[in-house]
Image (tube, grey):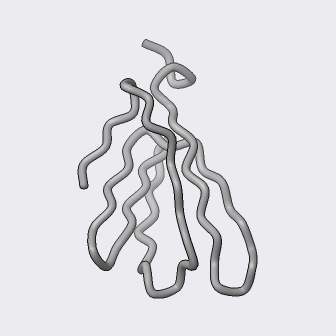
Amino acid sequence: MTVEEMACKVTVRWWDGYIETFDATEVRAGAYMLYIKFDDDERRIPLQQVRWYKFNHRATCESVS
C-alpha cells in the first residue's frame, strides 16, 4: 500500500482563524490532545488552542479515539 492510499486529511482551525491541513497516516483524538503522524514526523496539538478539527473516515486511515 502506498503512502497516498494510507493518507487521510486532517484539518485544524486554530482560534486565530488559521486553517492547517495535514496528510496524516495516523490520527488520535483525546479529550485534551490531538496526535497526528505524517511522513517521518508527528504533531501533538493541545485542543485548548484549536477551535475545531476534522478528519475523513477512510478505512485506510488508522484512527484511535
Query: Residue 11: x and y, percent?
Result: 60, 56
Q: In this view, does 36 lie above or below 3?
A: below
Q: Residue 27 location, x and y as percent?
A: 38, 50
From the viewer's side, name the closer residue of 51 and 45. Answer: 51
- Where is residue 13? Give x, y as percent: 64, 70
In this view, the residue farthest toward the top is 1
Report which quarter residue 61 is drawn in. Answer: top left
Q: Quadrant of the C terminus?
A: bottom left
Question: Could you tell me which residue is drawn at 43 percent across and 55 percent down?
Answer: 36
Residue 35 x %, y %: 37, 61
| 33 in relation to 56, above or below | below
Query: Where, by quadrant of the figure, is residue 32 drawn?
Result: bottom left
Q: In the figure, 59 relative to 13: above or below?
A: above
Q: Which residue is drawn at the image coordinates 47% and 44% (left, top)?
A: 40
Residue at image point 49% right, 43% down: 24
Residue 61 lies left or right of residue 53; in this view the side is: left
